[in-house]
Image (spheres, helix red, strand yellow):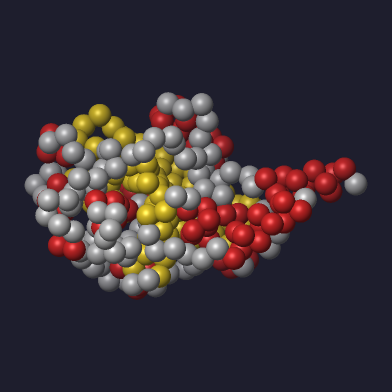
Amino acid sequence: MALLLHVLMLVLLSGGSAEVVENFEWECGQFFANRKSPTIFSGPQYKQICQTLNGVPYYATYYDTGNKIPVYSAYRFRGLQSCKRKNWYIEPQLDDTNAVSNMSSEGSVDINLRGVHQALSEDYKKSGYHKGHLAPVYQAGSQSCADATFTLTNAAPQDRFFNNGKWKSLERKIANDLVKQCLNLEYSVFIVTGVVPGTGTLKNENRVKVPSHFWTAYCCLDNNNKCQTSRGYIGENKNETPLNMTVKELETYLATLYEVRSFEVFPTPAYIVEIDQYRAYY
């Protein structure tokens, strides 16, 4: 129990680091329900990013440098704002480990290095696909937060009709539902949005993988850090209505698509399990 309390104190005291990190549960765990990230894959191509703009972390992204698309982005939902759209950034540290830790313009990285481990705006030009946000502008809680969503590490190639159609409608529906069902009850809302790599690449240049599916899920925690309301959605990367399902159903679906034994979007923290078992015992 002493070790458990020590671990909890470290979690609470850890700040939001503005860089590509070894473990974003520790560095920017405030964006994960109960500070537990979704499933992490093995392999050096996967990078954990605390998405930071002007020294402030706004969300976390798990990025695949091999496919040059994110696996997922995790963020808090705090309400609806009217935010403007901005220019796109990249994550300099993915291509140059000595670069600045804040997201920056593409010109901030040496031309011989930029784009080696991430997508660039040029990849999307005349590709027929949009830069599909994972942490979306519409659900951003402030203009600064909305600005921070405009990094290519938070985007994946999305069918333009899907982006402007069924997926856009889903983002709005989720936001409106969460205001009524969770924020009005003062629940803390956590969202994870991700993609599944497909078989094709942008402009057939073998650089940026086009996702076969986009998915998203939310969990609303009460004051006891219990998930009282949750839901999952997944849709093929075309303009059809995404499937509506429980988070457990989504996790099973994703395990099949990712070809892994299991996939957790909202893992149950060990310390909560311990507390529950302690209460049950007594």
Which residue is at 71% across, 51% downward? 4
Residue at x-position 26% and y-position 60%: 99
Image-based side of 223 in relation to 108, left or right: right
Q: How many marks?
A: 0
Q: Nearer the viewer, residue 81 or 191?
A: 191
In the image, taking residue 28 as reference, residue 282 lies left or right, namely: right
Q: Residue furthest right?
A: 282
Name the residue at 41% across, 58% down. Answer: 50
Asked if 255 appears above or below 268 in the picture, the reply is above
Point out residue 279 in the picture as x, y percentages from the top left corner. Answer: 84, 48
Q: Residue furthest left?
A: 126
Of residue 174 and residue 130, the one placed in the foreground of this image is 130
Residue 144 visible to an observer of this rendering: yes
Residue 83 vertical position relative to residue 12 in the rendered view, above or below: below
| Residue 127 locus on image (x, y percent) | 12, 44
Q: Position of residue 76 (x, y in %)?
A: 49, 61
Q: Residue furthest front?
A: 98
The location of residue 252, given as percent across then percent down, is 51, 31
Q: Residue at x 17, y 52 (%)?
A: 114
Can residue 81 be seen at all in this image of the molecule? no
Instruction: Compare residues 192 and 70 and report the one nearer the observer.
Output: 70
Which residue occupies the foreground of this view, 68 or 191?
68
